Amino acid sequence: MDLSIVIVNWNSSAYLRKCLGSIYANIRGLNFEVIVVDNGSTDGTAAAARAAGATVLHEPRRGYGSACLNGIAHALKSNPDVIAFLDGDMSDDPQELPNILQPIEQGYDLVIGSRMLGEREEGALLPQAMIGNAVACFLIRLFWSVRFTDLGPFRAVRVEALRRMRMSDPTYGWTVEMQVKAAKLGLRCKEVPVRYRKRIGTSKVTGTLAGTIKASVKILFTIFKYLFVKV
């Protein structure tokens, strides 16, 4: 299995070094490339990533989705079988990447690392994030009869399935877009429990009132949009 690993990073270079070191130490027997998408960092993220052996892309458009789309576009040039995504601030545990990939090897198309099913450090997920996850996952199950417990960033997807999804969201709706499209397309989806650590610094999404409102509106808009828009 040829693998591309996309990491979106913004001003967490110290933890990115640990993340990359853990990936290179724990992935065995696979041909893989690590792609770090620098989403406007000012703390030496690019230099830290290159020093660790990763490919570095610069995405000037702020937004998680924009950075992921940039990473996907680069990854597809080498035609991998699978693309995995995780955060680079060590809130996701890179040691668990083999657990994310195992169901892919068993034939699943999309695997989500569920923070709801796994262990979480105290304060790692704020109440508003947990409520938002619950509402979004309830709606996906209601509309498309596919059960998810989380919209977390730690995930892996077969490239064949990803091409069918035609991902497009540049901001907060990126993760839910992938899961909604997977549900509508009838792809084989699975969740695995993952550990989740408390984020370093304040989340740009759920760490502020404005971020929480914007993310909530975008996630709900995305879900209801695909009730009527063909994938």
Image (cartoon, rainbow, N blue to C red):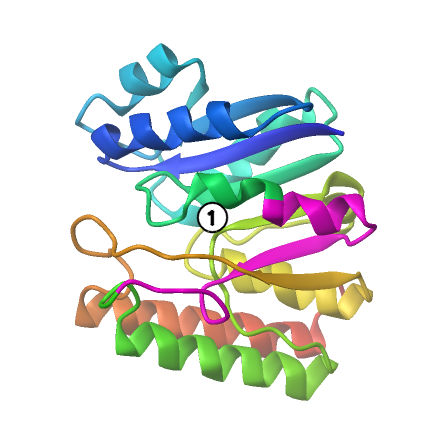
- Is residue 184 shown left or right of residue 169? right
Disc 1: CA contacts within 10 A as few (<14), some (14-19) or many (>=20): many
The magenta segment is: 99-121
Q: Is residue 81 above or below residue 32?
A: below
Q: Quadrant of residue 230?
A: bottom right
Identify the residue shown where x is 82% and y is 66%: 186
The residue shown at (18%, 28%) is: 42
Residue that label 1 marks? 65
Asked if residue 60 is positioned above or below residue 107 in the image, the reply reads above
Horizontal and vertical percent position of residue 187: 80, 61
Dividing the image into 4 quarters, which one contains the C terminus?
Answer: bottom right
Closest to the observer, 107 or 77: 107
Where's residue 123, x and y in %?
22, 67
Q: Is residue 108 magenta?
A: yes
Left or right: 169 with respect to 9? right
Relative to 140, say whether 156 is above or below.
above
Instruction: Inspect this view and state whether residue 58 appears.
Output: no
Q: Position of residue 194 (x, y in %)?
A: 48, 57
Q: 96 or 165, which is in the foreground?
A: 96
Q: Report helix, strand or loop for mark 1.
A: helix
Residue appearing at x 28%, y 62% in the figure: 121
Q: Position of residue 198 (x, y in %)?
A: 25, 56
Let me know if residue 30 appears in the view.
Answer: yes
Front position in the image: 2 or 94: 94
In the figure, is residue 89 to the left or right of 104? Answer: left
Pick out the residue farthest to the bottom: 142
